[in-house]
Image (cartoon, rainbow, N blue to C red):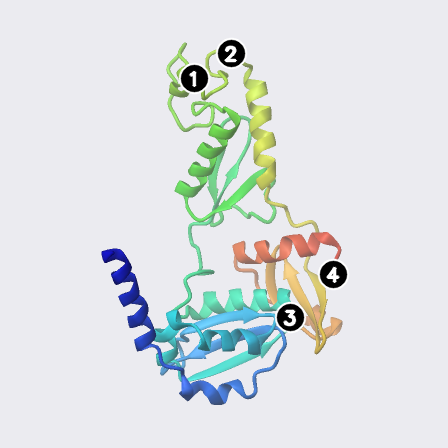
Amino acid sequence: MVRRATSHRLDFDAAAIYQYPEHLRQWLEGLPKVPGVYTFHGESENLPLYIGKSINLRSRVMAHFRTTDEASMLRQARRVSWIPTAGDIGAQLLEAQMIKTQQPLFNKRLRKNRQLCSLQLGEGAPEVVYAKDVDFSRSPDLYGLFRSRFAALEKLKSMADELQLCHGLLGLESLRPGRGCFRAALKRCAGACCGKESVEAHQQRLREGLERFRVVCWPWEGPVGMVERGAEMTQIHVIDHWFWLGSVATEAEARQLQRARQGFDHDGYKILCRPLLSGEFPLIEL
């Protein structure tokens, strides 16, 4: 009974502090029903409150106005701006770039990650390598993209549980000569560490498990333009080694667009890998 009363009180309080943001109503009038990126601005012109994307800008922004959980952000907002795009791919790319460069107060995702790492498999145990040291767009035998070394090692541990892999051969545990790993005694390791299976069989199972997370090397010599056509406009997204250089309207502009790559872009890879390789969008080699 006490918990129920507390829940009712919290619901009441949330409703009590929420007020429809009438001061922002004027910004709804010009919002188009097209894909794009929108920004809620506060008092500061240099630090936006929130940046989001949608395939229908008007519908998505209006949804914020009906959400009591966003009362704090809406009270601080002073205006809304937007940038239309040809479609969802363009909106995703622009949103990711704007969040990383402008660091809006209320966005928690898509922040710049300085510890991006992957698992690289050679002859022995997988090694954790970092994007600041290795070009992930060119390096073969990389598996998974992780925000920390801890996350990469946790993925290895979960694979060990799933595939009965040896913590010792994975580099997660020190092996004593002539003795198996701790998990072998629990029958959670198939026994490559103590002769119950061959090391070759263990490594083959490891490679097959990692293959699900392979990082695809950039398959072109240089940048390409991916054509995205929408109802209102067409955009050519210029991409070089999974890094989005920008979006333009014509092929001539795409060929002139030059911008230095700034390392491997995790968000760009996630957004672009499947669409670029699927053949769904026309491509122009630049």
Which label belongs to residue 247?
A: 3
Give the CA distance from mark 1 to mark 4.
49 Å
Nearest to the observer: residue 193 or residue 232: 232
Which label belongs to residue 95?
A: none
Q: Nearer the viewer, mark 1 or mark 3?
A: 1
**In the picture, residue 69 is in which quadrant?**
bottom left
Horizontal and vertical percent position of residue 16:
30, 76
Tell which circle, 3 or 2, labels the residue nearer the N-terminal end.
Answer: 2
Can residue 136 be seen? yes
Q: Within 10 Å of the Cα at label 1, are there few (<14), some (14-19), or many (20+) other Cα atoms?
A: many
Going by the numbered disc 2, the residue's amino acid type is Lys
Give the CA distance from mark 4 to mark 2.
50 Å
Q: Nearer the viewer, mark 3 or mark 4?
A: 4
Residue visible at 63% across and 46% down?
217
Nearest to the observer: residue 129 or residue 31: 31
Tell which circle, 3 or 4, labels the residue nearer the N-terminal end.
Answer: 3
Going by the numbered disc 3, the residue's amino acid type is Ser
Give the CA distance from mark 3 to mark 2.
56 Å
Residue indicated by mark 1: 184
Give the CA distance from mark 2 to mark 1.
10 Å
Residue indicated by mark 2: 196
Q: Residue furthest front?
A: 1
Q: Mark 1 and mark 2 in contact (Cβ < 8 Å)? A: yes
Judged from the image, the secondary structure of the residue bearing numbered disc 1 is helix
